[in-house]
Amino acid sequence: MEKQTYNPGTDDQTQPMPRPQVVEVRPQTLECDVVRFQNNKEKWVALVGLLNGYPYEIFTGLQDEEEGIMLPKSVNKGKIVKQVNADGTKRYDFQFENTRGYKITVEGLSEKFNPEYWNYAKLISGVLRYRMPIEHVIKLVSSLQLQSESINTWKNGVERALKKYLGEGAEVTGNEDNAEQHPTA
């Protein structure tokens, strides 16, 4: 099977996957995949907001009622809804349908998650929003040199969550030195 990429205009026989269009103004509601992973021995969740099936943003945090959000194991899809409060501040809510068909809303994702991880996820979301190909986003995330062991294992979980969106046959290749020198290549 030949490798498909998001690079338009290749000369070979394979049809390149079309590069998604940049949408700078976030829609109020985005479909979302729920991806679970472990960070050290803690259970984490990544909420990957999708625009036309392509990752547009990512939210990550503990699966814990006190320090994050607790979701039933059956939840693997939902919606991320952008809300504008009366004072003009914005927040993001996660909505899903439970097994009985009721809509459940977890309000204020930014308040549920550790601010350090939130900031890194905002950075990654910005890169996704401007449609850097997923394999390059994964290389960029893997090349981050972070201080604590905990955030480095979190970074590995984010990479695993994003690998789900690689095109069939696509893989992340190249050395990290090149990714560090050319993060938008």
Image (spheres, rainbow, N blue to C red):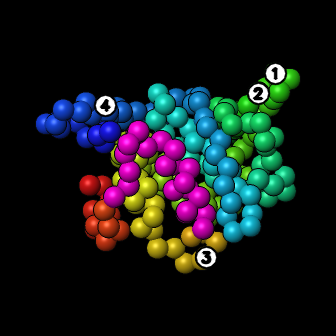
User: What residue type is disc 3 on?
Assistant: Glu
Q: Which residue is mark 4?
A: 18
Disc 1 + disc 2, Cβ < 8 Å: yes
Q: State the SS at label 4.
A: loop
Which residue is drawn at the image coordinates 74% and 67% (left, top)? 41
Looking at the rendered structure, which numbered label has been put on residue 97?
A: 2
Question: Which of the marked residues, 1 or 4, is nearer the chain's N terminus?
Answer: 4
- Calculate the distance from the C-alpha at mark 4 to the C-alpha at mark 2: 32 Å
Q: Residue at x 56, y 50 (%)?
A: 161
Q: Earlier in the sequence, mark 4 or mark 3?
A: 4
Location of residue 86 with respect to 65 vertically, above or below = above
Amino acid, disc 1? Gly
Q: CA distance from mark 1 to mark 4?
A: 35 Å
Taking the view exactly as shown, the residue that stands out farthest to the left is 11
Q: Position of residue 15 (x, y in %)?
A: 25, 30
Give the secondary structure at mark 1: loop
- The correct choice, above or below, for 98 with respect to 114 in the image is above
Q: Where residue 17 sits: x, y (%)? A: 32, 33
Circle 3 is placed at which residue position? 149
114 left or right of 55? right
- Report the residue at 65% width, 41% height from top: 34
Q: Position of residue 178 (x, y in %)?
A: 28, 67
Callout 2 amino acid: Glu
**Labelled pair 4, 3 in contact (Cβ < 8 Å):** no
Whether the residues at callouts 1 and 4 have beta carbons within 8 Å, the answer is no
Name the spot of residue 139 as percent of width and height, x first: 39, 59
